[in-house]
Structures are given as structure tokens and as C-alpha cells.
Image: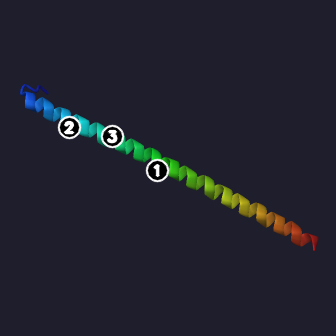
Amino acid sequence: MTLSNPSDRSAFGEDETLYRSIKALIERSRTQVVAQINQTLVLTYWQNDYLHVDMAIATLWRSQL
């Protein structure tokens, strides 16, 4: 694509700037979403693990009665 008119070049530059801004926004959003999903999965894992440990302790305690 050849841009002979200087105003065409500046318009293309504005499009490029907009493209880069949107791309950066999407990348930051993607990173934040991945971090949030990871945090949720870790918390869910440990809550479930804690529940299993708690149930095991309760079972042992009841067996001692």
C-alpha cells in the first residue's frame, strides 16, 4: 500500500496508534483474567483440601469416643 498524501500517512499513524493501544489493553486484560482464574482455582483447591483434612480429623476424633 502506497500512501502518497501526507494526510493519509497521519491517518494511518493514528490507526496504528489505536491498534497498539487496543492490543495492549487486550493483553493486560488477558493477564488479569488469567491471574484471577489461577487465584480462584488455588483457593478452591485449598478449601477442598482443608475440608478433607477437617473431615479426617473429625472421623478420627469420633472413632476415639
Tag 3: amino acid: Lys
**Residue 38 drawn at (x, y percent):** 55, 50
| Residue 18 left/right relative to 11 | right
Residue neighbourhood size for the residue with mark 1, other residues' Cα within 10 Å, grouped as few (<14), some (14–19), many (≥20): few
In the rendered view of the protein, which quadrant contains the C terminus? Answer: bottom right
**Residue 16 drawn at (x, y percent):** 23, 34
Q: How is the image coloured?
A: rainbow
User: In terms of sequence position, does the residue under pointer 3 or pointer 2 come before the other?
Assistant: 2
| Residue 15 left/right relative to 25 | left
In this view of the protein, which residue sits in the foreground, 65 or 28?
28
CB under 8 Å between discs 1 and 2: no
Q: Residue at x 84, y 68 (%)?
A: 59
Image mark count: 3
- Kindly report the distance in space between the C-alpha atoms of the residues bearing marks 3 and 1: 15 Å
Question: Circle 1 sits in a helix, a strand or a loop, which is it?
Answer: helix
**Residue tagged 2:** 15
**Residue tagged 3:** 23
In the rendered view of the protein, which quadrant contains the N terminus? Answer: top left
- Image quarter of residue 58: bottom right
Marking on residue 33: 1
- Kindly report the distance in space between the C-alpha atoms of the residues bearing marks 3 and 2: 12 Å
Query: In the displayed structure, would residue 37 be above or below residue 2?
Result: below
